[in-house]
Structures are given as C-alpha cells and as structure tokens.
Amino acid sequence: MNLFFPNLPFWSWIGLFISAYFIGMAKGGIKGTALLVIPIMAIIFGGKASSGIVLPMLLFADLFAVRHYKGHTEWKTLWKLLPMALLGIILGHYLGIYVSDTTFKLWMAGIVLGSLTLMLLQTKGFVNEKMVGHPVFASIIGLLGGFSTMVGNAAGPILSIYLLGLKLPKLLFLGTGAWFYLTVNIMKLPFHIFSWKTIHLESLILNIMGIPFLVLGFFSGTWIVNHLEEKSFRKLVIWMTLLAAVRLLFDVWF
C-alpha cells in the first residue's frame, strides 16, 4: 500500500490523529486507550503495516512516559519479564513473516480474549498476588507480552493485569510499565525495519504529522492520573482495557 500522505483520504488522517492522541493518553497513564488504536489503524493501513506505523509513535511517547515517571520503577519486576518478552518478540516476528493480514487480526483478538480471561480470574480471586509474583507466571506474562507487542502492539492488557495483580501503587505501576514498553519497543525496531519493512520514510512522515496530537494526549492522560485516587485508578485501568478489548474483538469478528 502506498502510504505517502497526499494519497490519504480525509478520514484516514482523522483516524491517524485520533490514534496518536490515544497513544499519548495511554503513555500518560490511561491504560487501555492504546488498544483502541489497533482496530482504527488496522482498518486504515492493514494489520502488519499498521503495526509498523504505530511503533515509532509508541517509542516517542515511551520517552515522555519514562521521563515523567522517573524514580517510580520496580526493576526486579522488569527483570522477571524481559528475557521471555524478547523470546516472544522473536517468535512473533518469525510467525508474522508467513501469515496474512486476517490471521494477524485473529491473533490480536486471541491475545485480547486471553487478557479478558485473566481479568475475570483476577476479579474472582483465582489470580492472587502470590500466584502473580511466581517466576513461572512472570515468564508466561513476559512471553505473551512479547508476542502480542510484536504482532499488534497489544501488550498493554496483559502487562496491566500482571502489574495490577502485584498491587503496585499507582506511580510504580506507571513507571514500571513505561520502562517495559520502552525496552520491548526498542527490541522490535530491527525486525520492523529490516525484516518486515513496515518502517520506512513514508511511514515516518505519518509519525511526524501525528506528534502534536500525541503530545496533547500524553498531557491529557497525566492530568487525569494526577486527579485520580488509587482505587479509582485501578477501576479505570480495568474498564478501559475491557472497553478496548471488546472493540477489537468486534472489529475482527464482524
């Protein structure tokens, strides 16, 4: 698909700018809004191509998030997740070479469905803090997170459930997540540039055009987070993730 911006219809620009705003909000702390980007961008550009367009915007926003929430990171949690996350990224990359766009979307739906299941288990008490803190559980989350972020930039729900299960305070939740996303998104760059070839000059032009909306979304998200209590924050994370998950499943199946 030719992405060069003069060829994009008006509604594609609207979708791009809305997506950039939602990415900024997510990195500012309103988790779940980034997942709304997946169906919007996939409809406009296709599954695999959209994942490459979204990635530089995520990285740009990650830098804002890491800077904003500096000093609020639980590093031991990160080290439990990252090795298996890298394996998941590699697995997602090689499987992604051989699948169609429809399969890409089905994978995204399956990932979100799994995240919803984790949410349900957690609310019913089946996923408790002790279980979530186990190294094996962390490895599974890392693997799923790495795979899902490679095929659709969709690790958010999985990581959110894990960090909520650990009962991290609001700022630790956001700071730890910020470093996880920055690290895995950097890991993904070579695969998108040199193998899938989904990041190139034309896609970067689109990224640049979306930056003002991304920055606006980021500061909107941080403003909302700063005015939320811990309990309200946890509820917002869960409900936004559920809303985004349902939207993605609807797009794939209908």
Image (cartoon, rainbow, N blue to C red):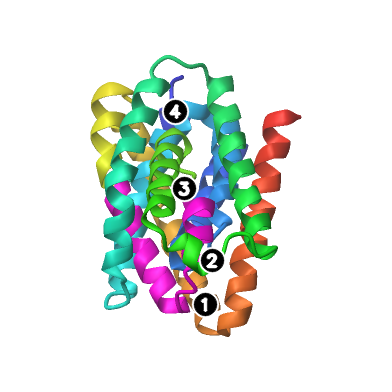
Residue drawn at 31 percent across, 47 percent down = 184
Q: Is residue 28 magenta?
A: no
229 relative to 28 in the view: left or right: right
78 relative to 50 in the view: left or right: left
Residue drawn 23% across and 33% down? 190
Q: Tell which tag, 3 or 1, sits nearer the viewer.
A: 3
**Viewer-closest of 112 and 216:** 112
Q: Say if residue 7 shows up in the picture.
A: no
Q: How many marks?
A: 4
Q: Circles 3 and 1: CB distance less than 8 Å?
A: no
Among numbered discs 2 and 3, the one appearing first in the sequence: 2
First along the sequence among labels 4 and 1 = 4
User: From this viewpoint, which residue is outermost toward the right?
Assistant: 254
In the rendered structure, the answer to whether residue 61 lies left or right of residue 249 reads: left
Q: What span is in magenta? A: 156-185
Q: Using residue 86 as the reference point, say whether residue 245 is left or right of it.
A: right
- Mark with earlier residue (3, 1): 3
Q: Which mark is residue 155?
A: 3
Q: Which residue is mark 4?
A: 49
Between the residue at mark 3 and the residue at mark 1, the CA separation in whole angstroms equals 20 Å
Label 4 vs label 1: CA separation? Answer: 32 Å
SS at mark 4 in the image: helix
Q: Which residue is label 2 attached to?
A: 30
The kind of residue tagged 1 is: Val
Of badges 2 and 3, nearer the viewer stands: 3
Asked if marks 4 and 3 touch (Cβ < 8 Å), the reply is: no
The local secondary structure at tag 2 comes to loop
Badge 1 or badge 2: first in the primary sequence: 2
* CA neighbours of label 2 inside 10 A, class few (<14), some (14 to 19), many (20+): many
Question: Which of labels 4 and 3 is toward the front?
Answer: 3
